[in-house]
């Protein structure tokens, strides 16, 4: 406890010294989320993180999350210094969509509008017409479908499949997945529902279709938090990273949250449903980055300028 308090006090001083603000994702360590809140930063989903960083007056953004979130911040505000607690924190969706292969895929289907998920590299974004996050994926694809556009969707096949089903749009899917959400098991969720019949089931759309089908609410992290607050249920089964429980429990202290099983038996698992890359962020490496200026995110200028177009389209669409 003393160590944690010392690290927090040190980071608070450094934030002032460096004119910096923390932009954290809901999946990061609750200690980081709490500190971001205490110090005027934000705890948010990936869309809100992008917006917050681009609008805040601080000259340094400390992005606690995974690499694509730091890259997005740098692309949107190239004049700011973007630091990350670690530059090693990536994402299986980003890894699973290398730009050369993706570019060839797009070239093979020149009649299709290219929509990529925010969980991609700057280079993949630069090849895209649109960037979306899970908060607005449905709305954007509905909008494009209404204009008669055919779509390439990358990289998450589960979210893409869900969007395709919901909108009826003509969507060609890339074969990527999130290693965390892909582990949720429909049988396990059904068993847990049988044990907690009054619980509402909240599912992030990166989960497999069979799990999504069991959901009362499907949505991005911020949409699932909103559902926890607004639904009358007092119990919830949640299929997304456990880091989200910090905010859910904070906003709904009287409600109970169960993590969706990643095993078919219905047994819950304390260490699973925890993104290994998000977990690489700690108070220690955050303090170190802020103190020494290490782990600064850079995006090559020409690439950043191209990637900024679909990112700005995303931000403008949601205004
Ligand atoms: P959200 O946009 O819903 O926060 O999701 C980001 C993410 O990485 C989910 O795994
Ligand atoms: Fe990527 Fe999945 Fe981790 Fe989100 S939870 S950052 S999608 S690997």
Image (cartoon, rainbow, N blue to C red):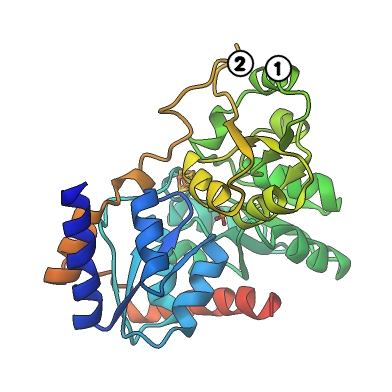
Would residue 18 appear left or right of 62 to someone viewing this image? left
Depth-wise, is mark 2 or mark 1 nearer the camera? 1
Query: In the picture, residue 213 is in which quadrant?
Result: top right
Mark 2 or mark 1, earlier in chain: 1
Q: Position of residue 229 (x, y in %)?
A: 69, 52
Q: Which mark is residue 266?
A: 2
Closer to us: 22 or 65:
22
**Tag 1 residue:** 195
Q: Position of residue 315 (x, y in %)?
A: 61, 77
Does residue 14 appear in this view?
Answer: yes
Closer to us: 135 or 138:
135
Q: Secondary structure at mark 2?
A: loop
Would residue 64 appear left or right of 240 to someone viewing this image? left
Q: Quadrant of the C terminus?
A: bottom right
Closer to us: 318 or 36:
36
Query: In the picture, residue 56 is in which quadrant?
Result: bottom left
The residue sitting at 67% across, 57% down in the picture is 109
Residue 248 to residue 14: above or below: above
Q: Are marks 2 and 1 in contact (CB under 8 Å)?
A: yes
Residue 229 to residue 41: above or below: above
């Amino acid at each position: 406890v003393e160590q944690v308090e010392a690290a927090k006090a040190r980071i608070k001083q450094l934030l002032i010294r460096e004119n910096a603000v923390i932009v954290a994702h809901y999946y990061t360590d609750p200690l980081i989320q709490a500190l971001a809140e205490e110090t005027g930063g934000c705890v948010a989903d990936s869309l809100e993180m992008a917006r917050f960083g681009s609008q805040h007056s601080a000259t340094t953004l400390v992005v606690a999350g995974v690499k694509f979130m730091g890259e997005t911040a740098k692309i949107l505000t190239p004049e700011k210094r973007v630091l990350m607690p670690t530059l090693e924190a990536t994402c299986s969706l980003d890894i699973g969509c290398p730009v050369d292969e993706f570019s060839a895929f797009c070239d093979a289907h020149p009649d299709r509008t290219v929509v990529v998920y925010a969980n991609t590299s700057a280079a993949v974004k630069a090849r895209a017409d649109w960037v979306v996050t899970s908060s607005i994926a449905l709305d954007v694809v509905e909008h494009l479908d209404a204009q008669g556009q055919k779509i390439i969707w990358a990289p998450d096949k589960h979210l893409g499949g869900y969007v395709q089903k919901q909108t009826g749009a003509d969507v060609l899917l890339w074969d990527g997945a999130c290693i965390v959400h892909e582990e949720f098991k429909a049988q396990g969720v059904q068993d847990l529902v049988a044990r907690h019949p009054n619980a509402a089931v909240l599912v992030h759309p990166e989960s497999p279709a069979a799990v999504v089908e069991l959901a009362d609410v499907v949505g991005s992290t911020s949409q699932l938090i909103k559902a926890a607050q607004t639904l009358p249920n007092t119990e919830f089964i949640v299929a997304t990273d456990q880091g989200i429980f910090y905010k859910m429990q904070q906003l709904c202290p009287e409600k109970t949250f169960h993590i969706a099983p990643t095993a078919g038996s219905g047994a819950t698992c304390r260490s699973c449903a925890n993104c290994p890359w998000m977990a690489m962020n700690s108070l220690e490496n955050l303090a170190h980055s802020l103190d020494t200026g290490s782990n600064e995110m850079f995006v090559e200028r020409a690439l950043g300028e191209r990637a900024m177009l679909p990112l700005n389209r995303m931000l403008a669409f949601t205004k």
